[in-house]
Image (cartoon, grey):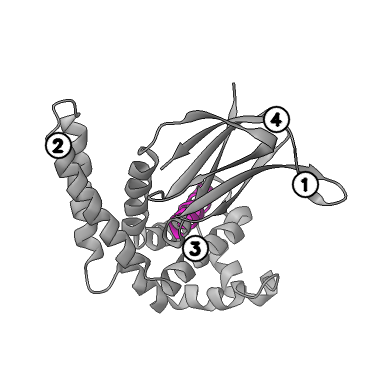
Amino acid sequence: MTEILYEHPLNERIRNYLKLEQLFVQARSCLAQEFSSSHTLFFNALFAILDTLDRTDLRGDVIKDLEKLEQNLILWSKSPDVNSKALQLNLEQTKTLATNLRSKQPLWANLKDDKFLDGMRKRFTLQGAYCGFDLPALVYWLNQPPIFIQQDVDRWLSALSTIEQALVIILKFIRQKSAFKDVEAGNSFYQDNGEGLLLLRIKLPEAVDYFPSVSGNRYRYSIRFMELCETKGQQYITDTVKFQLSKC
């Protein structure tokens, strides 16, 4: 049975992690398409990544999470049931990423000095303002041989690869913290204590005609199930809902 997975962060740090994860997926998905038609999505994602990194102390948060993960991996290595080879690979990667992120200036800071990107970034921040006549330099660049375009894109993404890889490994272990359990919500409402939790993951069958709306924080959270409505946009349902929940 096909299922839809919904995720909801319970603090701002994890919210930023999930946002960046999605932006990286969007940016890289463009590389598998005809770039001349997907470049707007690529640059919007790239500039949103840079804006997020500029506005928050995300690098410090990631370093702390990598250090915690390193400590946990060392503890897990003492368990006789652990896959030693896989654990060692994760441990080495975690150490390397933390070391690279501790450098005085992250590689993505160099993208601020890229005049081509800087000129486009100012235009792309104006909602709905981009058109070919606004950025003739971009039109010229898009008509260069594909190998030159690919080299530039690879260079830009490689400057962000350390933070991208760090988010991948951190989120992987957060998601593995808890298995999915069957839950029943009477009157389509469920609430619980959120203490110690970072992320909620909810699975529903693809065939159902409702979806979860989550609110809360690390102290307490609630889940209400909604359906689309032509007059209100969306509205609560009142049925008993069975779903799967993972509390990470």
Q: What stretch is highlighted in magenta?
A: 16-31
Task: Judge from the rendering whether residue 29 lies leftward or rightward of residue 63; answer left or right.
Answer: right
Mark 3 is on which residue type? Leu
Nearer the observer, disc 2 or disc 3?
Answer: 2
Magenta stretch mostly in which secondary structure?
A: helix
Please tell me which residue is depicted at 48% across the width and 75% down the height of the picture: 116
* Quadrant in the picture for residue 111: bottom left
Task: Judge from the rendering whether residue 5 lies leftward or rightward of residue 179; answer left or right.
Answer: right
90 relative to 58, above or below:
above
Image quadrant holding the N terminus, namely top right
Residue 133 place in picture, x, y as percent: 69, 74
Of the two numbered discs 4 and 3 on the same chain, state the one appearing first in sequence. Answer: 3
Please tell me which residue is depicted at 43% across the width and 56% down the height of the picture: 14
- Residue of label 4: 208
The CA distance from mark 4 to mark 3 is 35 Å
Mark 4 is on which residue type? Val
Residue 125 place in picture, x, y as percent: 60, 74
Looking at this view, is 153 or 29 the one in front?
Answer: 29
- Residue of label 1: 235
Q: Residue 46 carries which label?
A: 3
Q: Residue 77 carries which label?
A: 2
